[in-house]
Image: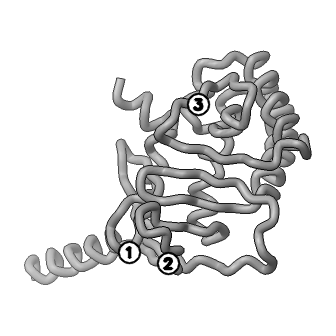
Amino acid sequence: MKTFVLLLAGIACSLATMAQVIKVQPPAEPLKDSIIYQGDNAILIFDRQHLLDYMIGMDTTLRNNKNSNKVFRNIQFSKLNNVDMANHFRKAYCFLEDTLNKEITFRTDKMNLLWAEDCGVLMPYVEEILPDLLATGNLKVVEKGSKIAQPAYKLIAEPINGNNYRVFRMNNGKEIFRESTFCVEQQLSHR
């Protein structure tokens, strides 16, 4: 009986650690105004409207929480006080709404300053929404080397100190995005 229970527990654990396959949803209409995020192995392309909708929602949330940096999970915001957080959000929001700023591209191999005068000011907000966009398949994933669009990719849970973070990988195993890299909770737990 003990062996049977251990076997069932082993099967349950192996099923729990299996990756969830996410199929990319084709856009209803071609992307006209897109944002490009280039990681080490993949290029992520999504509609600017996704970020704009997120920023509009966060505007209210941030005000309701007295501009607390705790509203965001991104490690870059952890040192900002309430006034700085409000100023940064306002600056990023104004940059995003400005119709002259058409080309929004981020590269993880280049340093982006938090208070940049260019699109770098938006990067922490983009990193906040990327896991959700990837989980729902609402963006285009292109392998960086071969330039092949990925029709599907895997979502894997990464447990760190009792918190589950999402890791997204292409079917060939190359990492697309790791949520724990940017989260405050994970970074603070290593101190």
Mark with earlier residue (2, 1): 2
The residue sitting at 68% across, 80% down in the picture is 26
- As displayed, is residue 61 above or below residue 40? above
**Mark 3, residue position:** 112
What amino acid is labelled 2 in the image? Answer: Ala
- Quadrant where the C terminus is found in the figure: top left
**Mark 2, residue position:** 152
How far across and down, in percent of the image, does residue 112 sit? 58, 31
* Number of the front mark, 1 or 3: 3
How far across and down, in percent of the image, does residue 144 sit? 46, 61
Q: Is residue 70 left or right of residue 178?
A: right
- Total numbered labels: 3
Q: Secondary structure at mark 2?
A: strand
- Quadrant where the N terminus is found in the figure: bottom left
The residue sitting at 47% across, 39% down in the picture is 109
**Mark 1, residue position:** 171
Residue 137 circle label = none
Q: Secondary structure at mark 1?
A: loop
Q: Is residue 151 left or right of residue 173?
A: right
- As displayed, is residue 76 above or below residue 61? above
In three-dimensional space, the C-alpha distance between marks 3 and 2, rounded to whole angstroms, equals 29 Å
Residue at the far front in the pictured view:
146
What amino acid is labelled 1 in the image? Answer: Asn
